[in-house]
């Protein structure tokens, strides 16, 4: 059965797409810990990120770098934190989060954003990437 991320990639479930290419898809987390919190996933459905073939794993990081630069352009910060937790959805993914301190990546502290705010954020980041 397809993961929720595969369904998002295929357009079966709506998302706030930030950027995509032939192999990867980036979209805003619907329960972000910071504005700009983005998920980056390979289009190839593999559960554990370290089970990806080397080319796909390397490509994921190169793709994430483009997205991270777009996020940082929209949300000035010290760094773009990245985390691979991978327990919530059985599809390899990476969290990219603008941070200025250690507490900015606390996954227990979620922020509420409207669908309109999420759409505006996704559009702003996309414009920085393209």
Image (spheres, helix red, strand yellow):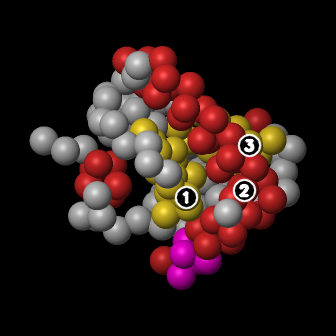
Could you say where residue 25 lies in the image, as x and y percent from the top left?
46, 50
The residue closer to the viewer here, 23 or 3, is 23
* Residue 80: mark in rendering: 3
Tell me if 110 is positioned left or right of 3 in this view.
Answer: right
Q: Quadrant of the C terminus?
A: bottom right
The answer to whether residue 123 is above or below residue 107 is below
Residue 80 falls inside the magenta stretch? no
Mark 1 element type? strand
| Segment colored magenta | 116-121
CA–CA distance in space, label 3 to label 1: 16 Å
What residue lies at 59% left-to-right and 68% top-to-bottom? Answer: 122
Q: Earlier in the sequence, mark 2 or mark 3?
A: 2
Marks 2,1: beta carbons within 8 A: yes
Q: Residue furthest left?
A: 1
The answer to whether residue 81 is above or below residue 120 is above
CA–CA distance in space, label 2 to label 1: 10 Å
| Residue holding disc 2 | 70
The answer to whether residue 72 is above or below residue 2 is below
* Residue 27: mark in rendering: none
| Comparing labels 2 and 3, the label whose residue is closer to the camera | 2
* Residue 19: mark in rendering: 1
- Quadrant in the rendering for residue 90: top left
- Can residue 88 be seen in this snapshot? yes
Q: Main secondary structure of the magenta part?
A: helix
Residue 120 falls inside the magenta stretch? yes
| Few, some or many residues within 10 Å of mark 1 (<14, 14–19, 20+) | many
């Amino acid at each position: 059965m397809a993961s929720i991320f595969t369904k998002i990639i295929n357009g079966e479930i709506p998302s706030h797409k930030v950027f995509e290419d032939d192999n990867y898809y980036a979209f805003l987390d619907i329960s972000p810990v910071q504005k700009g919190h983005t998920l980056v996933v390979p289009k190839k459905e593999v559960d554990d990120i370290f089970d990806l073939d080397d080319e796909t794993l390397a490509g994921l990081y190169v793709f994430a770098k483009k997205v991270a630069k777009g996020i940082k352009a929209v949300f000035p910060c010290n760094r773009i934190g990245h985390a691979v937790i991978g327990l919530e959805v059985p599809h390899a993914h990476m969290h990219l989060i603008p941070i200025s301190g250690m507490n900015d990546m606390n996954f227990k502290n979620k922020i509420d954003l409207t669908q309109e705010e999420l759409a505006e954020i996704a559009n702003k980041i996309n414009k920085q990437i393209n």
